Image (cartoon, helix red, strand yellow):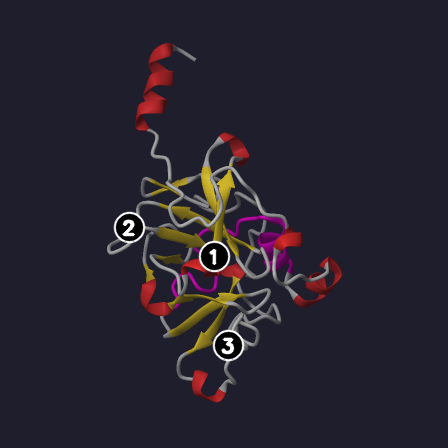
Amino acid sequence: MSGFNLLHLITNAKPVTLKPCGLPSGTCRTKKTWPKSFSQEELKKRLSPIQFHVTQERGTESAFRGEYTEYKEDGIYTCVVCGAPLFKSETKFDSGSGWPSFYDLIKEESVTVTDDFAYGMHRVETSCSQCGSHLGHLFDDGPRPTGKRYCINSASLGFQSASASASIPPSNGDGTGAGAGPGGADGAGAGAGPGGAVGAGAGAGPGGAVGGKTEL
């Protein structure tokens, strides 16, 4: 690589800061540290193949194929594995990326962010803070007021409708029991369309560009 090309790559790079991260940059939590844990055998029975691939194998669903990409209903998006509440529907926005995008969390501690150097690039991975399941990635090109874009796989999400929440018993504080509705923790539907392989589909490759943005 020429000196000019190398300088061009360095000067045009847009690294993501790790301000919301509860861990020092470069650290990585293992599943042993998560408050909740599930056996792989249980999850393979309970989740659809794409849900297991994304949440447990850090996979990526195809762009524009996920159940919640264009979903408009009011409610709470939860972790499909453990049911922990993650995002409110009012923080969801159309990023044009092909994956559900949110500009804020229900609680800062709902999601853990860690450095991800896979595929020869630096990204910030997002995981459920309760069970460690892979959700997607975090970017610094979101709308106000946070400027953040949580780019999340539909296959990682469940949904609790606001209209149905009155009839659902409250959670025990860690999200248990959430995730009712389409694509709930029983693994039905969420992101179960074709293209479970990493990089499948339009613009869905690791670090692929859609509309000038780095994606899942």
Mark 2 vs mark 3, foreground winner is: 2
Rendered image: mark on residue 181:
3
- The residue lying at 75 percent from left, 61 percent from top is 41
Q: Earlier in the sequence, mark 3 or mark 1?
A: 1
Three-letter residue code for mark 1: Val
Q: Earlier in the sequence, mark 2 or mark 1?
A: 1
The residue singled out by tag 2 in the image is 147
- The residue lying at 52 percent from left, 35 percent from top is 117
Is residue 164 shown above or below 123?
below
207 to the left or right of 142: right
Is residue 32 shown above or below 167?
above
Q: Position of residue 38 (x, y in %)?
A: 69, 62
Is residue 130 shown above or below 168?
above
Name the magenta segment's main secondary structure.
loop
Question: Element type at marker 3?
Answer: loop
Question: Element type at marker 2?
Answer: loop
The residue singled out by tag 1 in the image is 111
Q: Position of residue 98 (x, y in %)?
A: 40, 53
Measured Cα–Cα span from mark 2 to mark 3:
29 Å
